[in-house]
């Protein structure tokens, strides 16, 4: 449907949906206040129903924009994401499902990702980075395992709180790699073995700076690739189905314009015929 395509392609439509999602997020936050909830429970219920109605209307308009092939709506992953949130939001907020319904409402805030192209690009980049991050995680696991076994043998008798078993040693290494008071663990080991600083400093350099920078490099690389793919999608020529659909829309619009012109011509001819007898009888009246 042409009107639906014009609405979906307009900026005011996307801006309105974004504003509704932001307002919905504010209402969800206010709903967590016990005082406000007890005082304005009815208004919160009405507001949530209104927001859900807006989302349903949005989905219907987008489906109408794909008419007669409505299945195209579900070929877009972000549309499936939005539609799933709408379906989950239909869970009644009563009885045992009340908590689940409130959590489902919270999922509506995630729709900001689908409405903002920049956020969609970031999420697509993170998804693309998962396979590459697997290799980085494998490297980090090897480093953790080697340092964990070495730390157990070196410090389990000095600081059993942090190195008593391999599992505790790995947890201590995780604390070190987050740089959360890691110097306390180092000083406890250095109190008995002064050279222990080499172990901790080397692990911080490898685990924190090198591996974390590898993660950042992978994400940036995939971000560049995602941007390049997005540019290619924008520059790709239209498909035959899209061309045929545009031609049908153009033919429909031209038919409407032609019908309006014919109606205008008919009305003008009738008005001329009505004025012609009056013009012919005017001289006769003057002679008499």
Image (cartoon, helix red, strand yellow):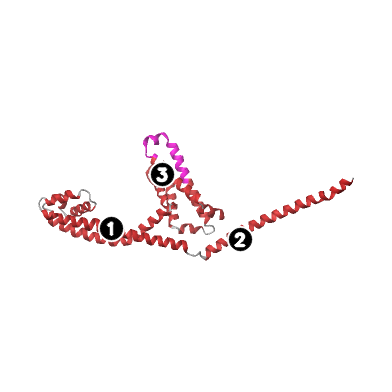
Task: State the residue position of label 1.
Answer: 213
Who's the residue at 47% across and 48% down the image?
17
**Distance of mark 1 from mark 2, alpha carbons?**
56 Å
Sequence-first disc among 1 and 2: 1
Between tags 3 and 1, which lies in front?
1
Q: Position of residue 219 (x, y in %)?
A: 33, 58
Task: State the residue position of label 2.
Answer: 251
Q: How many marks?
A: 3
Under circle 1, the secondary element is helix
Instruction: Give residue 25's mark.
Output: 3
> Left or right of 270: which side holds 66?
left
Q: Which residues are magenta?
A: 30-52
Q: Nearer the viewer, residue 40 or 199?
A: 199
Who's the residue at 40% across and 60% down the image?
227
**Distance of mark 3 from mark 2, alpha carbons?**
43 Å
Magenta-span inclusion, residue 33: yes
Q: Position of residue 110 (x, y in %)?
A: 40, 49
Between tags 1 and 2, which lies in front?
1
Who's the residue at 80% across and 51% down the image?
276
Mark 2: give few (<14), some (14-19) or many (20+) Cα within 10 Å.
Answer: few
Mark 3: give few (<14), some (14-19) or many (20+) Cα within 10 Å.
Answer: some
């Amino acid at each position: 449907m042409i009107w639906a395509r014009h609405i979906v392609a307009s900026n005011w439509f996307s801006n309105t949906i974004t504003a509704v999602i932001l307002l919905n997020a504010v209402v969800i936050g206010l709903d967590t206040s016990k005082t406000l909830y007890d005082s304005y429970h009815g208004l919160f219920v009405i507001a949530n129903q209104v927001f859900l109605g807006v989302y349903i209307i949005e989905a219907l308009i987008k489906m109408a924009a794909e008419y007669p092939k409505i299945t195209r709506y579900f070929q877009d992953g972000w549309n499936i994401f939005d539609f799933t949130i709408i379906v989950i939001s239909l869970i009644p907020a009563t009885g045992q499902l009340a908590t689940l319904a409130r959590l489902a409402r919270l999922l509506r805030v995630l729709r900001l990702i689908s409405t903002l192209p920049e956020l969609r690009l970031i999420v697509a980049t993170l998804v693309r980075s998962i396979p590459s991050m697997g290799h980085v995680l494998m490297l980090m696991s090897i480093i953790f395992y080697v340092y964990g076994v070495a730390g157990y043998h070196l410090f389990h008798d000095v600081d059993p709180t942090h190195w008593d078993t391999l599992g505790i040693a790995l947890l201590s290494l995780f604390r070190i790699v987050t740089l959360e008071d890691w110097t306390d663990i180092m000083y406890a080991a250095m109190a008995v073995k002064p050279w222990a600083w080499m172990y901790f400093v080397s692990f911080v350099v490898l685990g924190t700076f090198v591996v974390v920078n590898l993660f950042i490099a992978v994400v940036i690389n995939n971000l560049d690739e995602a941007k390049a793919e997005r540019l290619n999608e924008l520059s790709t020529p239209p498909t035959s189905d899209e061309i045929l659909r545009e031609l049908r829309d153009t033919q429909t619009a031209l038919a409407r314009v032609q019908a309006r012109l014919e109606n205008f011509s008919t009305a003008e001819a009738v008005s001329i015929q009505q004025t012609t007898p009056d013009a012919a009888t005017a001289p006769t009246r003057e002679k008499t």
